[in-house]
Amino acid sequence: MGRSWTNWATTAPPIQIRDIHVSPEQARLIIQIPRPILFTSELPDFDQRLLQCLPSLRSTICHNEDGLSFADELRATEMGHVVEHMVLALLTEQGIYAKGTTEWDWFTEPEGSFTITLFGRGFDPPTVTLAVAGALRVLEPLLPVTSSNELQLR
Ligand SMILES: [Zn+2]
């Protein structure tokens, strides 16, 4: 084909799902998040806007070193951690109570790669996939537009 048909004005989906694996008691999700939206502290008022869109996030429990509530943690955290809590909140709305962890190692994985692991009971692929898709659908309108150009240059 030679030159590609890249349309520089087209927006690319900022968050990519690289892998989802679901078993009844554990779900593992690998997502890729680009640099401009990697940390919530870089997005003005992001925490307040997100809590307005998904108030049930306030009732998710966060185990962090400083003992912060998730609403406080949300002011300055990694976007992968936000996705974890959003999926937990959406699963709870489906009657599925789970715990989660978000891990990353950008020495061995690409920068922006997060592994989210959920522990619970009664997981099935459609329910987990729906919660993940729902989380991204709520999240993406709150994020600055990322052009495919920017994504390719990284
Ligand atoms: Zn947390």
Image: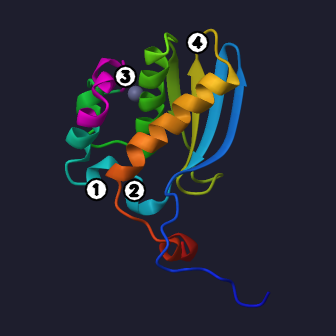
Residues tagged 1 and 2 counted as in contact (Cβ below 8 A): yes
Q: Which residue is mark 3?
A: 62
Q: Earlier in the sequence, mark 2 or mark 3?
A: 2
Label 3 CB, ligand 1: below 8 Å?
Answer: yes
Which residue is the site of mark 4?
120
Q: Residue furthest bottom?
A: 2
Mark 1 and mark 3: Cα distance apart in space:
21 Å
Q: Amino acid at mark 3?
A: Cys
Residue 59 appears in the rendering: yes
Q: Position of residue 50 (x, y in %)?
A: 29, 39
Could you tell me how far apart the alpha carbons at marks 2 and 4 are, in whole angstroms? 29 Å
- Total marks shown come to 4
Tell which tag, 4 or 3, sits nearer the viewer: 4
Name the residue located 40 percent from the left edge and 37 percent from the top edge: 82
Residue 110 picture quarter: bottom right
Magenta stretch bounds: 51-64
Residue designated by label 2: 37
Q: Amino acid at mark 2?
A: Ile
- The residue pinned by badge 1 equals 42
Question: Would you identify the image quadrant in which residue 5 lies?
Answer: bottom right
Q: Is residue 91 left or right of residue 16?
A: left
**In the visual, does 86 lie left or right of 124?**
left
Residue 111 placed where, x, y %? 55, 57
Q: Position of residue 150 (x, y in %)?
A: 48, 74
Of the four image quadrants, the one with ligand 1 is top left
Q: Secondary structure at mark 2?
A: helix
